[in-house]
Amino acid sequence: MLRFIKGNLENIDDVQIYPLISLLIFFVFFVVLFYWVFTAKKEHITEVSNIPLENDTNNQNDEIL
């Protein structure tokens, strides 16, 4: 199976750049995410973390009525 994939990839010009681009995109995404998490305001994190609890409470109240 790998033989067929490897044979097709060898025919593509400059195929060695694709893993590098993928690694760069992966790294940049997680660096930006890491930065966002550490710079986020505590109030925002608290508000967002309570969203599932608020929705669950609203759904339970609707079912009782």
Image (tube, rainbow, N blue to C red):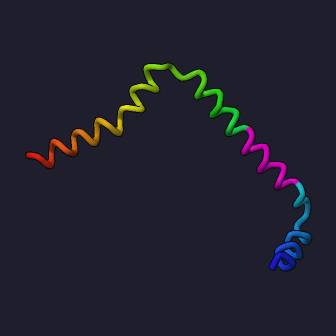
In the image, what residue occupies the spot 22% across and 40% down?
Answer: 58
Whole-percent x, y for residue 42 in the image: 48, 20
25 magenta-colored:
yes
How many marks overall?
A: 0
Q: Quadrant of residue 62?
A: top left
Q: Quadrant of residue 18?
A: bottom right
Whole-percent x, y for residue 54 in the image: 29, 35
Tell me the quarter of the image containing the N terminus.
bottom right
Left/right placement of residue 42 relative to residue 7 reads left
Left/right placement of residue 60 relative to residue 43 reads left
Against 45, residue 23 (above or below) is below
Q: Quadrant of residue 25?
A: top right
Left/right placement of residue 58 relative to residue 6 reads left
In the image, what residue occupies the spot 83% across and 75% down?
Answer: 2
19 magenta-colored:
yes
Residue nearer the viewer, 19 or 45: 45
Whole-percent x, y for residue 27 in the image: 75, 40
In the image, what residue occupies the spot 72% across and 45% down?
Answer: 26
The kind of secondary structure the magenta stretch mainly shows is: helix
Whole-percent x, y for residue 17 in the image: 87, 53
In the image, what residue occupies the spot 42% across and 25% down?
Answer: 46
Left/right placement of residue 2 relative to residue 47 reads right
Residue segment shown in magenta: 17-27
